[in-house]
Image (cartoon, rainbow, N blue to C red):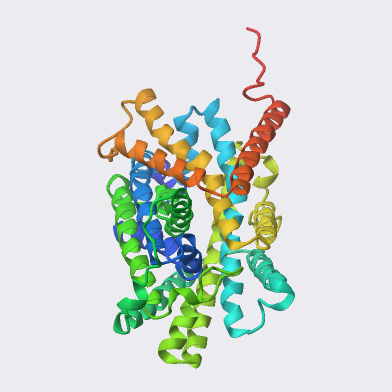
Amino acid sequence: MKAASAPASTAHPHLARRFGLLQATALNMSNMIGIGPFITIPMLMSALGGPQSMLGWFVALAIAIPDGMIWSELGAAMPSSGGSYHYLREGFGREKFGRLMAFLFIWQFILSGPLEIASGCIGFAQYLAYLWPGLVEKGNGHFAKLIAASVAAVIVVLLYRRIGTVGKITVSLWIGTMLTVAVVIVGGAMNFDSKLAFDFPPDAFKFSWGFLLGLGAASQVGIYDYLGYYDVCYIGDEVKEPGRVIPRSILISLITVAAIYFAINLSLIGVVPWREFVPAKDPPAPVASMFIEKLYGGKAAAIFTVMVLWTAVGSIFALMLGYSRIPFAAAQNGDFFKVFGRLHPTKNFPHVSLLVIGLVSIICSFLPLMTVIGALLITRIVVQFIGQIFAVILLRRRAPDMPRPYRVWLYPLPNVLALVGWIFIFGTSEPKVILFGIVSLILGIVFFLIWSGLTQRWPFERTQAS
């Protein structure tokens, strides 16, 4: 009799809530701090032509903090794995416009995810050029692009197998990343030259249309470097006390990483004159390796460069692993093309999703780094970031009784600030990047309508006669 009355909770496997504040913050920061600041500083400094370009990081932080509040309210109210996929679907209505927004989110992620992966591949080629002199010059940089694409291809091969646990790999990569960052910050602090760091060009802060566009470009770099402050929301099912942990981990991550980035930037330009790597080339100069060479010589710089390459490979591996699972999960729920929901017949991993993400990453690796960053942000701004601003507003009206452990402070002011900030980033982007964002959005809507028509779902569902 006792065996027949076993607790129901043991009948079905479920995700365990084991991520506390420390683990959640470490997850966010490990995704925010990678090769990003080491590859983007030349582009950041080129945006306004001098140290005043660091204003872009502060503008980006002013956008990311209110946006982080939006993520916090949604993540605390709906702590489930998938993040934006669930927020957009619930906020806009699961059966109608929510289906469209969820589809468009996955659609843009198939573009923006590989763009983010490609940025790491380009960064790998950028620093490999320090160890391999002449790499960039061969074929006017085409050979370096081929190297970047090859990195993406190799990662696909590494992931095309059964994956056990990557916990130890993640920890080792995190330690390596933080050690790399510490070397730069400590070395810069001990050898800091304020005359180099604050060597402003004439009329550095003269306001003009060109200054505004340059500030927008610098802010794009800043936003790119901050990406990941919300990653805990993608594993909401595994967070302890999500109503408390998710908001705090997001805010702590943003403030801490902002301080680290500012310290890295000052350390580098306080040792390496910014005019040595401005204007940025394609790919940009390996500034961090140049920094170590000036302080400790060529051998130490070579060892440091290997550390940066290790960080790049680790971040590419983790991104491609995680991003290949997002279309797979949506397809299994019936919110994306069914083919993406297929598992490998013997190795039990989403091989179709992985191959598509990998192929697009390889193609994107041939693009200039600033184009990659701009296109990455544009595709996410329209649907994901701006969409979530309105998802919060719609949910407050449609589901006022929904438990909200965290509510956006000073609502709706942060929503307005985030919206203005994202519009600023969008509006100051290169015209070709804006066109790419608009075209990709239109294509997403077209494919959604075709798919909905073939499957006879909203807005083409057939009503049954009673």
| Towards the viewer: 59 or 228 | 59
Q: Position of residue 316 (x, y in %)?
A: 56, 65
Left or right, 92 with respect to 453, comes to left
* Quadrant of residue 330 within the rendered picture: top right
Number of numbered discs? 0
* Quadrant of residue 406 within the rendered picture: top left
- Residue drawn at x 54%, y 74% is 285
| Towards the viewer: 37 or 282 | 282
Q: Position of residue 64 (x, y in %)?
A: 38, 50
User: In the rendered view of the protein, which quadrant contains the C terminus?
Assistant: top right
Q: Position of residue 329 (x, y in %)?
A: 57, 45
Q: Which residue is outermost to the top?
A: 466
User: In the rendered view of the protein, which quadrant contains the N terminus?
Assistant: top left
In the displayed structure, would residue 303 be above or below residue 239?
below
In the displayed structure, would residue 83 be above or below residue 92?
below
Left or right, 69 with respect to 135, comes to left
- Residue drawn at x 39%, y 53% is 60
